[in-house]
Amino acid sequence: QSALTQPPSASGSPGQSVTISCSGTTNDIGVYNYVSWYQHHPRKAPKLIISEVSKRPSGVPHRFSGSKSGNTASLTVSGLQAEDEADYYCSAYAGSNFWVFGGGTKLTVL
Amino acid sequence: QITLKESGPTVVKPTQTLTLTCTFSGFSLSTSGVGVGWIRQPPGKALEWLAVIFWSDDKRYSPSLKSRLTITKDTSKNQVVLTMTNMDPVDTATYYCAHTLSTTWTLDFWGQGTLVTVSS
């Protein structure tokens, strides 16, 4: 059982928007604004796409956006493209436990 | 450009000690705020944070694995080494190292990972 809860799967057609949720607690997402999202293609290094809840690193398309409300963070992918098909993981800083992760969401572009 | 690469055995026997090395470039572990963490992912399961070491030599461990883990750094070689004792088949996983900054608490650059199988 993961510390953060994500839906195991999500899907959308090209051009549509998809939102993936990440539920935590008052010990992690609820208290710190250090939520990250990673895109992971098989046999590749996980790629940071959102840091500190909503910041996009250089080179990450504007189609990716993040937000947080209470103990839940969300990743929205707008204008879905075929290359967005991947596993997505959320992560949160949790103080003395440092980092906790979600179980991952497999995003399928239909 | 920051890069990290994990290396170590692909197979270890139960009860043995695993030693993994993270060799990095593009940053220095002597720079204030910089850290390197280790994370693993068992097949089909979620990511799990294991340990982190900072420029100051401050070391932190996952509470559930603390008794089995040791993390060290060699700043001159740009390497971080993780050892895990008493390996068990449940420790079979892809092991990743990643760069972090204490100002953002984000694991922002990752290696490709190395698959370690625990089997007799």
Image: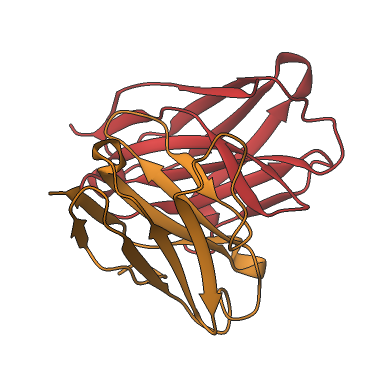
Chain colours: A orange, B red
Residue, x 80% and y 38% (percent of image)?
A: B55
Q: Nearer the viewer, residue B10 or B119?
A: B10
Q: Is residue B100 left or right of residue B112?
A: right
x and y percentages locating residue B70 in the rendered image: 59, 42
Q: Is residue B43 left or right of residue B76?
A: left
Q: Quadrant of residue B12?
A: top left
The N terminus of chain A lies in which quarter of the figure?
bottom left
Q: Nearer the viewer, residue A106 or B105?
A: A106
Q: Quadrant of residue B99?
A: top right
x and y percentages locating residue B64 in the rendered image: 47, 63
Residue, x 33% and y 50% (percent of image)?
A: A79
Looking at the picture, does residue A24 appear above or below residue B93?
A: below
Residue, x 51% and y 43% (percent of image)?
A: A48
Q: Nearer the viewer, residue B53 or A56?
A: A56
Looking at the picture, does residue A89 appear above or below residue B57?
A: below
Count of labels shown? Answer: 0
Q: Is residue B10 left or right of residue B69?
A: left
Q: Nearer the viewer, residue B97 or B117?
A: B97
Looking at the picture, does residue A69 appear above or below residue A40?
A: below
x and y percentages locating residue B104 in the rendered image: 71, 53
Q: Residue furthest left?
A: A110
Q: Is residue B22 left or right of residue A5?
A: right
Residue B25 seen in render: yes
x and y percentages locating residue A83 in the rendered image: 28, 36
Residue, x 79% and y 41% (percent of image)?
A: B57
Residue B88 seen in render: no
